[in-house]
Image (tube, rainbow, N blue to C red):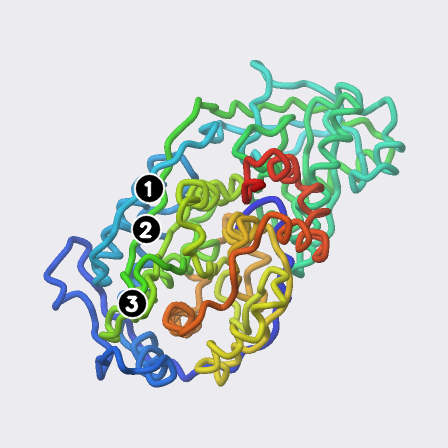
């Protein structure tokens, strides 16, 4: 999952389907489709309704499939996939081949440019006084490097980074490295808070004249992770790093005891000029209204401390498998379904923004965006982005999977994943509501690896995603119209999303028309 606000979605419980065992491993190189695409039993004609097709699709999703091996290859072989890096390029090439293995003929990539390329150098912090000890830390994403030769400075405790914390630090914060405390990350609200409060803390640090910011890890057991607070692919405003919680607390105890903590901090991050990235797009063309389309998507990029299995490799593999399930059903929906693997999500939802901008001329024909981006916690329904008008039609269309527990349709409006730019273009959006499961502890962390993924649960999600996409694409009527800019502005106010956009730094992009629906007379 993504960037500036991590999660406004409310999660509930989901009844589990019985799982069906072992995945069938596909070859890495293309082979004849008859050998590589497991077919659902009882392929259907175009007369079949979604309700009639749903059991076949779910059976296909739960049965033998390439899903597990796809995820293993993406996470173990390709690994972390930071946008703009060679690993991200390899992942995009793999995504094209994986869709073709799934039987989808129309597969291509769409390039876009991100403002800055970034990778971490050898981040190091040495305690000079009062007593040396090893400090484990990593740069946050898109942080600028420290000046050549590093920074030698006092560490000053700024508490939680609020006004009171900086007031207590006072003039000592000038030219110092400020230490910001954190609470443990447990809930979706905790995760949201890490992003909503971050920009204001950075602004306070800059106003105080601090040289750098050290964030205390919100995870236990020396676990490190990587975030970024920048919203449009630009560099952060000040050097920042995440410090292992136990090491940060050790520094804080020295300071509480009245002992000065002096350090030498080096973070020689590598910054490049604008770099290309690309989204992977596959399409099943509709039989009656092929120019109208739905997007089913997940983000392909990840951070690089772990291998991006929960965030968001599992859902990449799931979207590819949903394409396989729909193809294997033998039935073509009324409208087209586009399966999109976005990149640049972690740097400010850049891939989905680029897709929305590039396809602006046809967005009147886009009926919905369905996005998965919360690991493998049980899917309980969808957040509908404040669109009260689509609750009833979505509930009716997705009745075939209500028995699976997919029935909690909330009005949460989020800017935490790749639905956001479609929402502010006026398109109906559905973001999977999911239980947290093991997502929080491993979020963006070195521990986000293949072994954390519940494959049986992920197969259930493949069936849910396939039926959801097919149901909306095949419905006689669209679930709702594209909103005007005035209607979007009212939605932002009604949901409070306008305030979240202001906190996270997205609001100027909306006001200037850089992101979102253009102003029309």
Q: Is there CB contact under 8 Å for labels 2 and 1?
A: yes
Query: Dot 2 corresponds to which residue?
Result: 281
Instruction: First in sequence, mark 2 or 1: give its number.
Output: 1
Q: Report the Cα–Cα distance between label 3 and label 1.
A: 26 Å
Q: Which of the two discs, 2 and 3, sits closer to the camera?
A: 3
Q: Is residue 494 visible?
A: yes
Q: Which corner quadrant of the image does residue 199 belong to?
A: top right
Q: Which corner quadrant of the image does residue 464 belong to?
A: bottom left
Query: Dot 1 corresponds to which residue?
Result: 110
Q: Position of residue 356 (x, y in %)?
A: 45, 45
Residue at 40% over, 74% down: 476
| Vertical placement of residue 363 versus 277, above or below | below
Which element is circle 2 on?
Answer: strand
Q: Is there CB contact under 8 Å for labels 2 and 3?
A: no
Instruction: First in sequence, mark 2 or 3: give its number.
Output: 2
- The front one of 498 and 483 is 483
- The front one of 170 and 380 is 380
Which element is circle 1 on?
Answer: strand
Which element is circle 3 on?
Answer: loop
Other-residue count near label 1 (Cα within 10 Å), few / some / many at <14 / 14–19 / ≥20? some
301 to the left or right of 494? left
Other-residue count near label 2 (Cα within 10 Å), few / some / many at <14 / 14–19 / ≥20? many
Q: Report the Cα–Cα distance between label 2 and label 1.
A: 7 Å
Query: Dot 3 corresponds to which residue?
Result: 288
| Vertical placement of residue 167 versus 483, above or below | above
Q: Position of residue 416 (x, y in %)?
A: 58, 51
Q: Report the Cα–Cα distance between label 2 and label 3.
A: 21 Å
Other-residue count near label 3 (Cα within 10 Å), few / some / many at <14 / 14–19 / ≥20? few
301 to the left or right of 267? left
Q: Position of residue 11 (x, y in %)?
A: 61, 69
């Amino acid at each position: 999952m993504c960037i500036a606000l991590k999660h406004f979605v409310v999660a509930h419980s989901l009844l589990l389907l019985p799982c069906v065992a072992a995945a069938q491993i596909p070859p890495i190189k293309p082979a004849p489709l008859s050998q590589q695409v497991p077919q659902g039993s009882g392929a259907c004609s175009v007369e079949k309704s979604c309700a009639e097709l749903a059991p076949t699709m779910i059976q296909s999703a739960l049965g033998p499939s390439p899903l597990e091996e796809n995820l293993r290859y993406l996470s173990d072989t390709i690994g972390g996939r930071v946008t703009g890096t060679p690993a991200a390029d390899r992942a995009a090439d793999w995504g094209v081949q994986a869709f073709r293995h799934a039987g989808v003929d129309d597969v291509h990539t769409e390039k876009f440019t991100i403002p800055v390329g970034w990778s971490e150098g050898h981040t190091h912090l040495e305690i000079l006084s009062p007593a040396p000890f090893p400090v484990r830390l990593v740069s946050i994403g898109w942080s600028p490097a420290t000046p050549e030769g590093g920074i030698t400075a006092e560490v000053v405790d700024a508490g939680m980074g609020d006004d009171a914390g900086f007031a207590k630090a006072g003039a000592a914060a000038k030219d110092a490295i400020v230490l910001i405390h954190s609470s443990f990350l447990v809930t979706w609200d905790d995760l949201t808070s890490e992003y909503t409060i971050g920009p204001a803390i950075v602004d306070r640090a800059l106003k105080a004249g601090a040289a750098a910011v050290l964030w205390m890890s919100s995870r236990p057991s020396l676990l490190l992770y990587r975030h970024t607070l920048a919203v449009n692919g630009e560099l952060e405003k000040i050097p920042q790093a995440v410090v292992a919680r136990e090491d940060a607390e050790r520094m804080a105890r020295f300071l509480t005891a009245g002992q000065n903590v002096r350090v030498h901090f080096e973070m020689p991050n590598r910054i490049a000029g604008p770099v290309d990235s690309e989204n992977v797009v596959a399409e099943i063309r509709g039989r009656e209204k092929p120019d109208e389309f739905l997007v089913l998507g997940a983000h392909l990029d990840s951070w690089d401390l772990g291998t991006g299995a929960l965030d968001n490799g599992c859902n990449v593999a799931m979207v590819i498998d949903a394409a396989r399930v729909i193809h294997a059903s033998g039935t073509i929906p009324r409208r087209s379904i586009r399966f999109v693997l976005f990149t640049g999500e972690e740097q400010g939802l850049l891939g989905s923004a680029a897709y929305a901008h590039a396809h602006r001329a046809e967005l009147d024909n886009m009926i919905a965006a369905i996005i998965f981006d919360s690991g493998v916690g049980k899917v309980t329904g969808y957040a509908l982005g404040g669109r009260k008008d689509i609750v009833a039609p979505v509930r009716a269309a997705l009745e075939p999977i209500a028995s699976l527990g997919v029935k909690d349709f909330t009005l949460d409006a989020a800017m935490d994943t790749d639905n956001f730019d479609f929402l502010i273009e006026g398109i109906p959006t559905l973001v999977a509501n999911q239980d947290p499961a093991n997502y929080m502890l491993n979020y963006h962390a070195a521990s986000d690896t293949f072994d954390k993924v519940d494959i049986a649960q992920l197969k259930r999600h493949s069936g849910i995603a396939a039926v959801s996409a097919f149901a909306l694409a095949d419905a006689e009527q669209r679930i709702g119209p594209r909103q005007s800019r005035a209607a979007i502005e009212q939605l932002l106010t009604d949901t409070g999303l306008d305030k979240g956009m202001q906190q996270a730094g997205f609001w100027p992009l909306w006001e200037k028309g850089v992101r979102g629906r253009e102003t029309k007379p």
